[in-house]
Image (cartoon, helix red, strand yellow):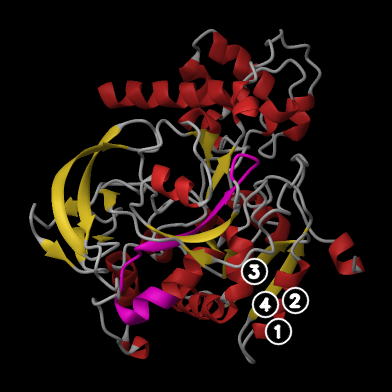
Amino acid sequence: MPQELLTAKTFAHGVHPPEHKDATERSAVRRMPFAPTMLIPLAQHTGAPARCIVREGQEVVRGEPIAEPGGFVSVAMHAPATGVVARIARTLDVAGRMTPAIFIRVFPGSSQEILYGEYRDMDSLSPEQLVQAVQACGLVGLGGAAFPTHVKLTVPEGKKVEVVLANGCECEPYLTTDHRVMLEQPELLMDGLRLAVRATGASRAVIGIEANKPDAIETLRAKIPEGEPFSVQPLKVKYPQGAEKMLIKAVLRREVPSGGLPIDVDAAVFNVATLTQMADLVPRQQGLIERVITITGPGVERPGNYLIAIGTPLRFALEQVGFSGSANQVIMGGPMMGAAAPSLDIPITKGMSGILVLTEEEAARRPQKTYACIRCGSCVEACPMFLNPSHLGALARTAAYEEMEEQFHLNDCFECGCCTYVCPSNIPLVQYFRVAKSKNRERKAKK
């Protein structure tokens, strides 16, 4: 390995789980067939749900807007396939909640050509118009958070963005979506960086990539346009290097303050797939209707990276890759931050970057017994936010949720799972913290 990769930058603390990327990191992106029925939830992003603008029985073409933003922190939705609006009703979402959705019955004889949208002159758009165009195309962060991209591109009054960071770390085990996007669409990524720099007024851009992707590092360095203030920064392979605060710390040596955002240190962070889609969709005035998803794990016959239409039922997608098991074998996302699928009938959404499928034997293994905390300090040494997970866990067990937030910075935890991963007593610390945050939100809502 080149010396540059051996001495790559990183952050303090973190863990080194097995990568498990061999099965898909060399698999080129393949398109998945269209399901007979698509389910498009109106709440696929952080913020207000979109507002439906179609009616039952209405025919729609692929790419046509079917829902408008429900506010500033909201995005539009578009038809992922040509068909007819079969019904507008509630469906189960990734979190196991019932949420409003648009059901589209796909026309089986359609070529599924994108018939909506037309090219526009990007040079004529002001930064404000560019932000509006990004919202109209329905773009959200494709790294998993699904935060509306146009909000990140909007620089608040009194703030500034000096550097745009493109996040190509993909530190979550098993997932290789971003890796393939960087290898297969490097020109679009550069175009997306240009748009982000233009919208935010940044003076430069840096692409952060973990050192286990030397082909992506080499490819992107070769594609940097002459004269552009872009660079590629190799980073050490460590989890959670892809978290935006960790990425900022490693690349810029700046620390986002407690309760703060990247803008507080003059930075804006975007996933590489998000930037690529922005460069592809905005000039053509088209919506986000499909994305690349890694489907992998010992429970599938044909693991790979697939271009899948938003709204595709999970069951249909898994059948295409050779899986016939049950929902308790499926994790939405990776093993560190992913969540168990509540059902195989949930739809693929914009924020879904990976699907990990276990074998029936692995899923059936009974969880190990949880023991008392032995005060070993492993969780403290692993926490990238320098919290005390052991003490937070003890408070959680006594339901001292307000104290966790007000005195011990609970909300600085971004639920990476490092503490749970290293705990020798098998204490589900990150699950405790999720419950605590949920209880605090409920308490504030009642007030």
191 relative to 383, above or below: below
The answer for how far apart the CA atoms under marks 1 and 2 are is 6 Å
Tell me the kind of residue under disc 2.
Answer: Glu
Q: Which mark is residue 197?
A: none
- Sequence-wise first label, 3 or 1: 3
Q: Which mark is residue 220?
A: 4
Q: Residues within 10 Å of mark 4 (few under 14, many from 20)?
A: many
Q: Quadrant of the N terminus?
A: bottom right
Tell me the kind of residue under disc 1.
Answer: Ala
Q: Residues within 10 Å of mark 1 (few under 14, many from 20)?
A: few
Tell me the kind of residue under disc 4.
Answer: Leu
At horizontal 30% and vertical 53% (from top left) the residue drawn is 73
Is disc 1 placed on a helix, strand or loop? helix
Q: Which mark is residue 218?
A: 2
369 relative to 142, above or below: above
Are the two marked residues, 3 and 2, in contact with CB atoms closer than 8 angstroms?
no
Q: Where is residue 179 drawn, in percent x and y? A: 64, 63
Are the two marked residues, 2 and 4, in contact with CB atoms closer than 8 angstroms?
yes
The answer for how far apart the CA atoms under marks 2 and 4 are is 6 Å
Q: Which residue is mark 3?
A: 207
The magenta segment is 280-300
At horizontal 23% and vertical 52% (from top left) the residue drawn is 50
At horizontal 51% and vertical 18% (from top left) the residue drawn is 403
Q: Where is residue 186 drawn, in percent x and y? A: 59, 77
Q: Which residue is mark 1?
A: 222
For the residue pair 342 and 191, the one nearer the viewer reads as 342
